[in-house]
Amino acid sequence: MDLEAAVRKHSEMLYRICIVILGSEQDTQDAIQETFCKYLEKKPKFVDGEHEKAWLIKVATNHCRDIQRFRFRHPKVPIEELAGTLVSQQEDREAVRELLQMPPKQRAVMVLHYVEGYQVKEIAGILGITEHAVKKRLQRGREQFRTAWKEEYCR
């Protein structure tokens, strides 16, 4: 059976199993996608349709367990809570909240420059990027802050 037929035939069943295990739509979609990627990668030979179904269920539930294990080892902290623990004043919390919502590449440059006090050249060396890239990310980060503050205080 080819991948397309397997997806049509088994995706709803895998969805039901994964959503019950994970309780998250996004994680469920990831688990199903990884299951079918494994199907494509391994190209297993099946005796019959039941063997294929059992294999897909086993792979999907194993991946669900991996996701749960990852969640347990890497718990998420709400941005509000993190911002509150990093700084005490409300205005500073809002700045940290805005910083935490930036794309990771921009966030790293902004933290290294404004929080840790590194110069552009040093940041370029730490991150393994050009000085021009550091300057551009700083520029975009400042623009994002400016936009956020205008929206917040010009209402």
Image: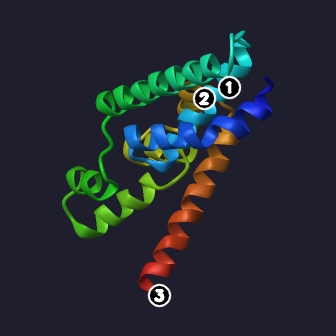
Dot 2 amino acid type: Glu
Q: Earlier in the sequence, mark 1 or mark 3?
A: 1
Q: Position of residue 90 (x, y in %)?
A: 24, 69
Which residue in the rendered view is the most extreme toward the bottom? Answer: 155
Colour scheme: rainbow
Q: Tell me, yes or no, whether the two marked residues, 2 and 1, touch with CB atoms within 8 Å.
A: yes
Q: Is residue 18 above or below residue 114?
A: above
Q: Nearer the viewer, residue 99 or 36?
A: 36
Q: Name the residue rendered at 56%, 64% in the picture.
A: 144
Q: Nearer the viewer, residue 33 or 79?
A: 33
Residue 34: which numbered mark, if any? 2
The answer for how far apart the CA atoms under marks 3 and 2 are is 46 Å
Q: Is residue 146 above or below residue 12?
A: below
Judging by the rendered image, the residue that carries numbered circle 3 is 154
Judging by the rendered image, the residue that carries numbered circle 1 is 37
Dot 1 amino acid type: Cys
Q: Name the residue rendered at 38%, 28% in the picture.
A: 70
Residue 103: which numbered mark, if any? none
Q: Earlier in the sequence, mark 3 or mark 2?
A: 2
Q: Nearer the viewer, mark 3 or mark 2?
A: 2
Q: Position of residue 126 (x, y in %)?
A: 53, 26
The answer for how far apart the CA atoms under marks 2 and 1 are is 5 Å
Q: Name the residue rendered at 55%, 36% in the picture.
A: 14
